[in-house]
Image: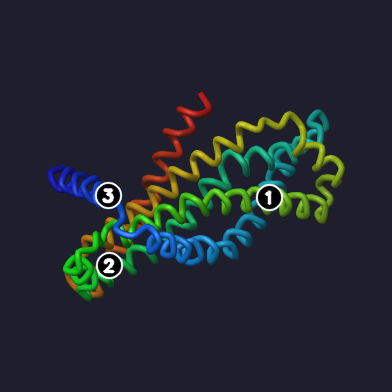
Amino acid sequence: MIRFLNQFGKYFLLLGKVFSKPEKTIIYYKQTMSEMVYLGFNSVGIITIISFFMGAVITLQTAYNTENPIYPTYLIGLGCRDSIILEFSSTITALILAGKVGSNIASEIGTMRITEQIDALEMMGINSATYLILPKIIATLIFNPLLTLISIIVGIVGGGIAGTLTGVITPEDFIYGIQYAFIPYYITYSMIKTLFFAFIITTVSSFQGYYVNGGSLEVGRASTRAVVYSSVLILLFNVILTQLLLS
């Protein structure tokens, strides 16, 4: 318990350092653009592939579990749309990024810590926490919602293609289903969750890397902890935000 409270306090102290005033705004702008490419744009491929097959599986499972004459077939498209928007795109995308982006952040900052690069930044009068972590937070808060939107679109398209090719639903019924009783707030809900998840992934992973002690073995352990802790917190906040935003 004491160790947990110690880590909890160090986490918020680090956040206090991160959100202090930057020395030169132009440097942080360039760093943020670089992080958007590294942490965001480079993740588009894996998000697209996983979302396509995720949408296909959701459509097929919905179809095979609603094989009843009293159920109209357009419900398959409706179920695919709502499942992807409400849950799968935001949460699954966050878990994927926790593994890909979170481990990268923890290992990058951890390596800088054990090679004394962070100490060198501090010696030059640079706030290392702000310089290293703030651009990552801004980049993920901007780009992760775009990744979620891509996931939603690709997932629904994948569901439509899978449903049409397997013959479980016609294109007309699927399109009608994804348009039926659409609630725009669901997109807002998904974006809000994505912002929370992006902040969790970046800050938790940065915290694990920033306070690494030891050598390369400890960097690997910090990377693992970053993925595990981020994933657990994502699932926890998924429950909390769902209760707060949809109740």
Q: Where is residue 103 in the image (x, y as percent from the top left)?
A: 38, 63
Q: Quadrant of residue 64?
A: top right
Distance Cα–Cα, label 3 vs label 1? 37 Å
Q: Where is residue 37 in the image (x, y as percent from the top left)?
A: 51, 65
Residue beneath disc 1: 153
Q: Which residue is drawn at 12% across and 44% down?
A: 2
Residue beneath disc 3: 20
Q: Do the residues labelled 2 and 1 touch (CB within 8 Å)?
A: no
Q: Where is residue 56 in the image (x, y as percent from the top left)?
A: 70, 53
Q: Do the residues labelled 3 and 1 touch (CB within 8 Å)?
A: no
Query: What amino acid type is highlighted by mark number 2?
Result: Gly
Q: Residue at x 15, y 47 (%)?
A: 6
Residue beneath disc 2: 110
- Give the foreground label among 3 and 1: 3
Query: What amino acid type is highlighted by mark number 1?
Result: Ile
Where is the N terminus found, in terms of image quarters? Answer: top left
Q: Decide: is 246 above or below 231.
A: above
Question: In the shown orientation, is residue 139 left or right of residue 119?
Answer: right
Q: Decide: is 64 above or below 112.
A: above
Question: In the shown orientation, is residue 102 left or right of residue 60?
Answer: left
Q: Is mark 3 on a helix, strand or loop?
A: loop
Q: What element carries label 2?
A: helix
Q: Label 2: how many residues lie within 10 Å, few (<14), some (14-19) or many (20+)? A: many
Q: Position of residue 183 (x, y in %)?
A: 67, 30
